[in-house]
Image (spheres, grey):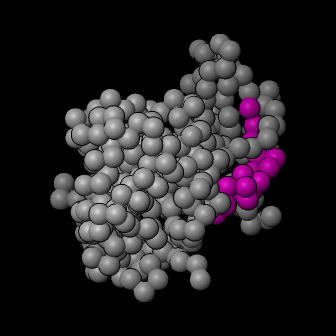
Amino acid sequence: MTLELAIQGLSKTYPNGVRALHGVTLTIPTGMFGLLGPNGAGKSTLMRTLATLQEADAGSARMGAIDVLRDKDAVRRQLGYLPQDFGVYPKVPAQDMLDHLARLKGLKNGGERRDVVATLLKQVNLWDVRKKALGGFSGGMRQRFGIAQALLGNPQLVIVDEPTAGLDPEERVRFHNLLAEIGENVIVILSTHIVSDVSDLCARMAIINKGEVLLTGDPTTLTAALDGQVWQMAVAREALEATKATYPVVATRLVAGRTLVTAVAPEAPGEGFRAIEPTLEDVYFAAIGGRLPAVRSAALAG
């Protein structure tokens, strides 16, 4: 039986008036689920709410028979959480720290705890440095240690918040492989602003901005929905602002010294634009940039 996390109408406004979540509704199945959005979109607020670290103003969330917002102890028994920033004791060896965290998680039997700690350190490829102090770990090693602590107690829901930010390409690939392995049998929510993390790992995803869900689906279908609607043109730097003001531009970038503008429209928006194959990044920028009708209409037509 596969587990499902059902979120309905979740809202949160902070005392300073910032509306972090507005009627968020999502159905998250077993497997890797990508929550994609820019910094400040509400991703971390949603993750902290699901992780029982803060209250929602309205809405509901259920994981199987568990009321996530009200039965916090039951959620915590099923939860593994890797926040965006987590502290470690820099002078404590990885093995000792994980053993301590396992005690806090309720693993009282010494022999069982040693086996669990050893298994997790091997799973995240840190066994060979198990006696090294955490303060000497690289960023990628720290993230892998964070996953090891999140997996204590065999959680059914694993939440990872911006896990690959700051990692070098090799560590990112290693971390991707680890997350893919974890996500085979449990719910893993990957919250990130890095589009490639979602396109590489997730079978289902949602795009969120300003506290609202803009789009949900599987990355392949959402990308295919923009077939024939993504256009690109090189422009001189001095003409960039005029181009953005004239055409439905969703993204710009420098490539080999040239400024390329990407536009989303049902047909060529102007002379000089050429059709290109859409990517998930185009879907993301179209959604964030208010070109969502083009995405939705294409998805409905497909």
User: Residue 22: horizontal and vertical position, in percent?
Assistant: 38, 65
Q: Report whether residue 123 is seen.
A: yes
Q: Residue furthest front?
A: 111
Instruction: Look at the image and say whether residue 249 sits in the magenta stretch.
Output: no
User: Residue 149: horizontal and vertical position, in percent?
Assistant: 36, 54
Q: Is residue 75 above or below residue 265?
A: below
Q: Nearer the viewer, residue 241 or 159?
A: 159
Which image quarter is the N terminus in? bottom right
User: Residue 41: horizontal and vertical position, in percent?
Assistant: 41, 51
How many marks overall? 0
Residue drawn at x 60%, y 15% is 237
- Classify residue 250 by image quadrant: top right
Residue drawn at x 49%, y 60% is 189
Residue drawn at x 45%, y 41% is 126
Instruction: Look at the image and say whether residue 218 sits in the magenta stretch.
Output: yes
Q: Is residue 233 above or below residue 37?
A: above
Left or right of residue 20: residue 235: right
Which image quarter is the C terminus in? bottom right
Left or right of residue 238: residue 209: left
Q: Nearer the viewer, residue 282 or 178?
A: 178
- Classify residue 261 by image quadrant: top right
Q: Report whether residue 193 is seen.
A: no
User: Residue 132: horizontal and vertical position, in percent?
Assistant: 33, 34
Residue drawn at x 27%, y 48% is 97
The part of the chain drawn in magenta is 217-232
Q: Residue furthest bottom?
A: 65
